[in-house]
Image: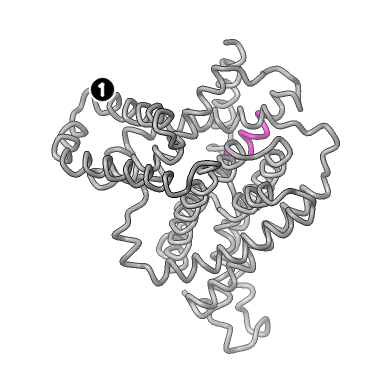
Amino acid sequence: MESIVLALFVCLVLAIITKYLSIPPIPFYIIGGVLLGKSGFGLVTSDEIGHFFSQMGLIFLLFFMGLELKLERIAANRSAVLTSGIIDLNVNMLIGFVAAYLFGFSLIESAVIASAFYISSTAMAITSLVENRKLMMREAETVIWLMVFEDLVLIIFLAIISAGDQDPLLFLLKIAGVLAILYAIAHYGKEFLIGLLDRSDELPLLFTFAAVLTTASFSMYIGVPETMMVIALGAALATTDPDAFEQHARPFKDVFLVVFFVFFGITINLGGGIDMVMILTISLLAIVSKFISGILTGIFIHESALAGIEIWGNTIGRGEFSIALAALYGSPLVATVIAAMVIVTSIVGAFTAKYCTGLRKWMAMPGRRPPHHAHTGR
């Protein structure tokens, strides 16, 4: 019990410091966990209580992902979503996979690293756009659609890797059955759910918490991973009143997710002959690969390489979903590599998101670039 209290206190201190300094908190939560755990001072171990809180953070993160899947908006903007998303996917997934494989990881481990390498932090990207007052820039919309596409790819990846040794057809039928049931409940119980969420007492919070945990628990009885079940629940409830569900689920997600990052850091082992050159190389490649995909996206979507600098600057940071993949499917070494990549890219990404507009203007100055590329795409 003392360990979880200490971890929560460290979470609070780190949250206050990062909010005060306006810097991304995720890498510092992980670093805090590393310092508390076996790679640091050895003050905290990952016990059952810490594991439970960490699982809650992961579950509510995936539930939020489901709530954000507004299929009608995706369909209305499918051209921009597909074009930018496919460029981002092909460039980053390929570079991440090849780099991991050349460093000696197995095909499955390389796929996990490549997926974590590919997917940017939605929280960091949106937060940087808001805090740096860039939401009115047209590149901001492209960044948002990139995040949506990455979430869809992550769901497909989770479905594939979660199937394991199960019969693929049976697994897909289970997923389809779960989706049908959840969407039926959301459709026919929509008025009841909206009325429940409008209450001013504790019932909306209790219902949201119980719905997520019950869904996750039920998954073990039907052989469907809880990750898929809670995403499906969020997607189904998004057809009712997603804003209300986000409001009631956010306190649980925010608290549990912070604990998840800290306890993930606690499990990281930096001893045992970790190849720091490999870790640094993959982290630097993660920055370079987003630069390549950002420039290509800027050219194809906005007809401006300079617009790609803005996209790159706001998508460098890897974060919550990369760590989720490491926690779910990564070996200790894979988890360490992904954790280091998240720390490096999120810190670098905080600066690029803030200063990429200035870099873009500097590059657009006369004499810096050929005249036909001098426009900024804004």
Q: Quadrant of the N terminus?
A: top right
* Residue 169 drawn above or below residue 74: above
Magenta region: which residues? Answer: 25-33
> Is 32 colored magenta in this rendering?
yes
Horizontal side, residue 211 vs residue 128: left or right:
left
Question: Which of 279/223 is in front?
Answer: 223
Question: Which of 235/29 is in front?
Answer: 235
* Residue 331 drawn above or below residue 8: below
How is this picture coloured?
one colour
* Residue 123 drawn above or below residue 214: below
Question: Which of 236/222 is in front?
Answer: 222
Residue 306, horizontal then vertical, whole percent: 57, 74
Residue 87: image quadrant is bottom right
Residue 241, horizontal then vertical, whole percent: 24, 43
Residue 22, horizontal then vertical, whole percent: 55, 43
* Residue 306 drawn above or below residue 369: above
The residue positioned 34% from the left and 39% from the top of the image is: 233
The residue positioned 32% from the left and 43% from the top of the image is: 177
> Is 256 colored magenta in this rendering?
no
Q: Residues within 10 Å of mark 1 (few under 14, many from 20)?
A: few
The residue positioned 78% from the left and 54% from the top of the image is: 281
Secondary structure that dominates the magenta span? helix
Horizontal side, residue 48 vs residue 101: left or right:
left
What residue type is disc 1 on?
Glu
Residue 227, horizontal then vertical, whole percent: 46, 38
Element on which disc 1 rests: loop
Horizontal side, residue 135 vs residue 119: left or right:
left
Question: Which of 164/319 is in front?
Answer: 164
Which residue is identified by label 1?
202
Q: From where the camera sits, is residue 251 visible?
A: no
Q: From where the camera sits, is residue 74 visible?
A: yes
Residue positioned most to the bottom: 371
